[in-house]
């Protein structure tokens, strides 16, 4: 039935018929105010009712770095090359935290926003995108802490320095976003039917950290019988590469060709996640 008899053009047209891979940047831009509201909500409400508030942005990576340094470097005697052990751990935790919060925040998109999605229309991709942007603010704060310790260790004589590879920083940041968003969107589609996945996710992510070369360099497992687990984990190369571009330590593993393949894998993962996300958003309200 023709609901527009005067053949007037609509300002907006909402339809259930969408492409398998649909990422409408123009529509997202039109809802940019809503995006910024979600970002503000994520930043403000996380620690709103805590005693220390935003100080947790500083405490968590510092405390974890101290524990890792004591356990893995002082007790387990894992060497970190030219990079001071504490700085090595702080850099890995900073990178890992950003990937983790992107993954965890995106993975609960449908369950956490079911009530909102069922009442009003807006581009659903705005929600996971807001997680990426809000966590980018936290990542920036933690990078500031890392920069402070970086300067301190250089002033004490540590043989580390920035190099031309440091210009690849945005590339590794984008890789963390692609893998976090892609995997998160896939998990968010699965949790609409299988709630058990959300319960297992926290444990899985914690385990994943230890096989992603976060508390140790990849060379530490070169001769280990379990080294293949890390060798086939793209996140391990992202974490190791992130450290390499910051410290320019030749003992850290860096292979530009492998990073290129990992980048292609990240793009594929993101596309698959987006396709599943777009398909699920049409029917998830009946099952969530």
Image (spheres, rainbow, N blue to C red):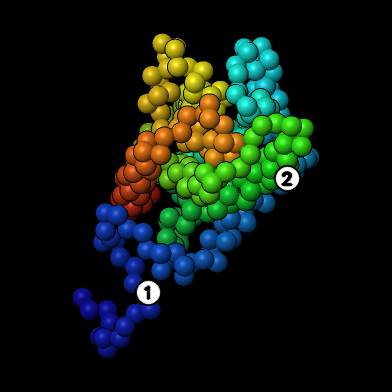
Direction bottom: furthest residue: 6
- Tag of residue 12: 1
Judge by depth and name the residue closer to the eye, 274 or 162: 162
Residue at x-position 60% and y-position 24%:
81
Circle 1 — which element? loop
Residue at mark 2 to residue at mark 1: CA–CA distance: 40 Å
According to the picture, the residue beneath numbered tag 2 turns out to be: 54
Q: Position of residue 274 (x, y in %)?
A: 35, 49
Q: Position of residue 249 (x, y in %)?
A: 57, 31
On screen, residue 82 above or below 108:
above
Residue at x-position 76% and y-position 37%:
155
* Residue 19 visible in the picture: yes
Q: Crowding near pointer 1: few (<14 within 10 Å), some, many (20+)?
A: few
Q: Position of residue 260 (x, y in %)?
A: 37, 42
Query: On the picture, is 200 further left or further right than 14?
Result: right
Circle 2 — which element? helix
Residue 142, quarter of the rendered image: top right
Direction left: furthest residue: 1
């Amino acid at each position: 039935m023709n609901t527009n008899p005067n053949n007037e053009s609509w300002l907006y047209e909402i339809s259930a018929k969408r492409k398998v891979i649909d990422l409408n940047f123009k529509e997202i831009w039109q809802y940019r105010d809503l995006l910024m509201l979600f970002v503000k909500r994520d930043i403000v409400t996380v620690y709103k009712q805590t005693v220390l508030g935003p100080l947790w942005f500083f405490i968590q990576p510092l405390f974890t770095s101290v524990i890792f340094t004591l356990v893995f470097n002082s007790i387990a005697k894992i060497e970190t090359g030219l990079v001071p052990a504490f700085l090595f751990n702080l850099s890995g935790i900073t990178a890992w935290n950003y990937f983790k919060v992107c993954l965890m925040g995106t993975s609960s998109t449908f369950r956490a926003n079911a009530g909102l999605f069922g009442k009003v229309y807006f581009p659903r991709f705005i929600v996971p995108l807001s997680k990426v942007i809000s966590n980018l603010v936290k990542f920036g704060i933690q990078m500031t802490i890392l920069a402070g310790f970086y300067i301190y260790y250089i002033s004490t004589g540590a043989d580390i320095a920035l190099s031309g590879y440091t210009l690849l920083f945005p590339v590794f940041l984008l890789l963390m976003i692609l893998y976090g968003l892609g995997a998160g969107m896939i998990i968010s589609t699965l949790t609409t039917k299988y709630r058990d996945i959300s319960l297992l996710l926290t444990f899985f992510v914690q385990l994943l950290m230890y096989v992603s070369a976060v508390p140790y360099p990849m060379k530490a497992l070169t001769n280990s019988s379990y080294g293949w687990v890390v060798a086939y984990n793209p996140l391990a190369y992202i974490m190791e590469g992130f450290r390499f571009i910051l410290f320019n330590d030749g003992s850290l593993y860096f292979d530009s060709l492998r990073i290129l393949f990992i980048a292609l894998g990240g793009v594929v993962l993101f596309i698959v996640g987006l396709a599943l996300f777009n398909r699920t958003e049409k029917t998830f309200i009946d099952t969530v």
